[in-house]
Image: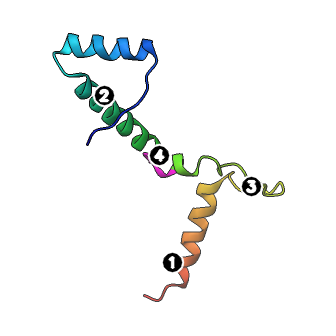
């Protein structure tokens, strides 16, 4: 496919210089640059872990001063004891 764009002189000089240095055509330099840009853009869109996806929401809620994040291990252990005590054997 043929595609035509207008470039400023600095960008054109950069493409010509890179093509000459790499022994590539100007079109190959532009294709490579676009592929690299797309790869960065795609990776920026997908969070690596769930915490990154939820980052805008972490700490956004107000518990009303109930301090729910304190002693969570102790509270979880108590919950497990209660659940196991109710489970038939």
Write the residue at 25% across / 22% down: 26
Write the residue at 46% across / 40% down: 44
Would you say the residues marked 1 and 4 are in contact, meaning their CB atoms lie under 8 Å apart? no
Q: Is residue 22 magenta?
A: no
Magenta: main secondary structure: loop
Please state if 70 lies on the left or on the right of 2 as rendered.
right
Write the residue at 43% across / 12% down: 10
Farthest-out residue, right: 64
Of the numbered discs 2 and 4, the one sitting upstream in the chain is 2
Report which residue position mark 4 lands on.
45
Q: Which mark is residue 84?
A: 1
In this rendering, the label closer to the viewer, 2 or 3: 2
Report which residue position mark 2 lands on.
30
Gap in angstroms between the C-alphas marked 2 and 1:
64 Å
Part of the protein shown in magenta: 46-50
Q: Classify mark 2: residues with Cα within 10 Å, few (<14), some (14-19) or many (20+).
A: some
Secondary structure type for disc 4: helix
């Amino acid at each position: 496919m043929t595609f035509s764009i207008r470039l400023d002189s600095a960008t054109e000089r950069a493409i010509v210089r890179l093509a000459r240095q790499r022994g590539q055509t100007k079109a190959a330099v532009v294709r490579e640059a676009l592929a690299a840009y797309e790869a960065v853009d795609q990776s920026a869109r997908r969070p690596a872990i769930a915490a990154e996806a939820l980052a805008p929401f972490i700490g956004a809620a107000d518990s009303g001063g109930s301090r729910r994040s304190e002693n969570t291990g102790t509270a979880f252990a108590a919950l497990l004891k209660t659940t196991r005590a109710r489970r038939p054997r």
